[in-house]
Image: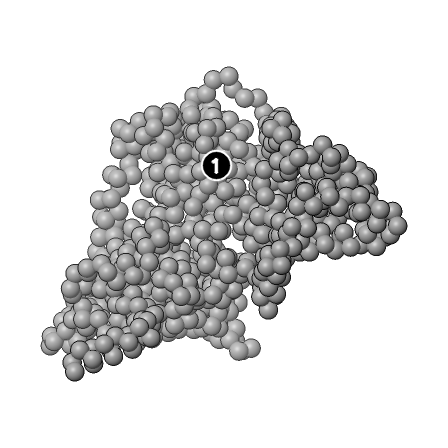
Amino acid sequence: MLAAGIVILIWLFFIFDLDRYFSLDTLKIELDRLQAYYQANKILTIGIYMVVYIVMTAMSLPGAAVLTLAGGAVFGIFTGVLIVSFASTIGATLAFLFSRYLFRDWVQARFSAKITAINAGIKKEGGLYLFTLRLVPVFPFFMINLVMGLTPISTGLFYLVSQIGMLPGTIVYINAGTQLAKIDALGGILSPNILFAFVLLGLFPIVSKKIMEGINLKKIYTNYSKPKRFDYNLVVIGAGAAGLVSSYIASAVKARVALVEENKMGGDCLNTGCVPSKALIASAKFISQAARANQLGLEDAKISFDFARVMERVQSIIKKIAPHDSVERYSQLGVTCIQGRATIISPFEVRVKGVAGDQILTAQNIIVATGARPMVPDLKGIEAVRYLTSDTIWNIRTLPRRLVVLGAGPIGCELAQAFLRLGSKVTLVQRGARIMKKEDSDTAKIVMDRFGAEGMDLRLNHGAREIRVNGEEKLLVCEHQNREVLIPFDEILVALGRTPNTTGFGLEALGVTLGPKGNIETNGFLQTNYPNIYCCGDVHGQYQFTHTAAHESWYAAVNALFGRFKKFRVDYSVIPWATYTDPEVARVGINEQEAAAAGIDYEMVIYKLDDLDRALADSQPHGFVKVLTIPGRDKILGVTIVGHHGADIIAEFVLAMKYGIGLNKILGTIHIYPTMAEANKYAAGLWKKRHAPEKLLAWVEKFHTWMRN
């Protein structure tokens, strides 16, 4: 109704040719009469003028410039500036509110993936952006009003900045209005010289900001002396995925780079994370396939194995991959690899204590890529047992008879299922009502059902309270429905997430700002509060994935080395990930629960894999492909895949989201038959069927009937 009312008013304005009353020629002709009326009815004239001005500005109608001139001609400079300043700001704010009420939700939902960075910038420096635009009359003010209404800037800030920012332009126009007889055309008011002056005025806040940044930088570095010469362009602390990629990029562009690692090259991913866990999962999966021999038409299949040999195989896989991350390889690439404990002693110096003795490295830039460690809860009695984590579980060589896994996130679920299949009696303990809390409930249910079918003891809504040791018996004490529950175990695996490694190497003394979860806080360019100190990977804490660490590393390295010329804001718009349970859970973009929390409107199609030929042939007919799209369009907002090889087949959707490929193009792409990837095409087909042009098809049916007759 509001939109219709505005459209009707604008339509009437032009239908009745009302714009002729707001022309420069009409104003000149009527000027004497207007001035006489003002002298006789000052309050009424000001009231009528303000109402007309506010309405025209609110509806973005032409004529505001002429009205401003009229204000100067009739009211004079002081009164004219006062009236127009408030009327123009009130009208602009109303236009801003109309735009926000009518269009913001739609724009934010439709362009959610691309508008995130703009929203972040507006929230941080929206006032500065608006002030700069208001100072330069080159930009149409009505467009600024409407566009700002689509952003998160607050109404109060918009009004205040507009009131101040439009004042110089108002003064120029009001002053011109006092000399109306000398003006032949509106374009004459803003001569090239005046426009240039406004542009300089508009640049003033930007220049001022840069000057303030320079002053702040001097304050930041005031207690530190900058070396006249540096040993390295870049020093990277930590040789996990983030540190390795950062070093690789720096060496590729011929920078001198040092990579410092205290323990093993390759970090968590190679030594205690992705690689060993996937190697263990592969062995466990082979056993599970033998267990379902009957489903594959076989009489029986039995596998005997030695758990110690399984764990030795895990170590052998690590050794096979280790050369990719080795000191030898990176030294050949031109990276100076140093083994030792790094401590940042100034923004330009890193002390390394290692086998080669102590040394101090000077660097123009530092990248902190120190990763994360398993989070261990403050659980009463935990110090009395040898608890396992994702770091230490690879050291055991005896299969736990009874294993309790504390935490049902990705790590807990993966390892719980692997040890269950290897023969442990596994109890999975979760405080919440379901596992995988970041995934949709229907996704988690499929995995939970599989866990239950395989014999896992799922203890949901169980809050761990303490660990008791009675002789040889170890018990986890939980609270469930206000009563105490005792769960016996031989080994307990703590899998409650990971904590960034930010202590013990100088960040505290330096005063590097940390976030609420203990992660290093950065801006969009991965700079800390010291602009030459960057961070990436798990220690940054945005996404704790190996592939995201590598992704951030490019931005950290390039911004560190070339930021004085061009900086790149890290792009998190399309981040995929997977949980390697069986069935696998893979995701990119948003899911249903995230869309609901953010108030994002969406359409959804689900293709169930029990209808897919390849899934049936492999006796893996479980799971689904779920696609969320913008309502009425084939643009993908997010995809969740649960099923056999889900982490592999989601790659097509990752590419599609990254480069704006819609479901129509996926449907039009040939997929090999029979493959699991055909599920992507069938999901796109379901979307297409839902959006079939029914009215057109009804006419086509009539055409075919006519042709038959």
Point out the image quarter for the N terminus: bottom right
The amino acid type, in three-letter code, at marker 1 is Tyr
Q: How is the image coloured?
A: one colour
> Quick one: label 1, few (<14), some, or many (20+) residues within 10 Å?
many
Residue name at image x 30 percent, y 68 percent? 688
Quadrant for residue 580, please give it: bottom left
Residue 679 to residue 129: above or below: below
Residue 476 to residue 45: above or below: below
Please state the total of marks drawn on the protein image: 1
Q: Is residue 80 left or right of residue 356?
A: right
- Answer yes or no: is residue 687 visible: yes
- Answer yes or no: is residue 624 visible: no
Whole-percent x, y for residue 477 in the image = 49, 70
Residue 283 to residue 230: above or below: below
Q: In this view of the protein, which residue sits in the foreground, 313 or 56?
A: 56
On the image, numbered disc 1 is attached to which residue?
534
Q: In this view of the protein, which residue sits in the foreground, 438 or 350?
A: 438
Whole-percent x, y for residue 146 in the image = 58, 52
Extreme residue toward the right, this view: 40
Point out the image quarter for the C terminus: bottom left
Q: In this view of the protein, which residue sits in the foreground, 222 or 672?
A: 672
Residue name at image x 31 percent, y 52 percent? 655
Say which element carries label 1.
strand
Whole-percent x, y for residue 176 in the image = 72, 35
Q: Is residue 574 left or right of residue 349?
A: left
Extreme residue toward the front, this view: 29
Whole-percent x, y for residue 210 in the image = 59, 30
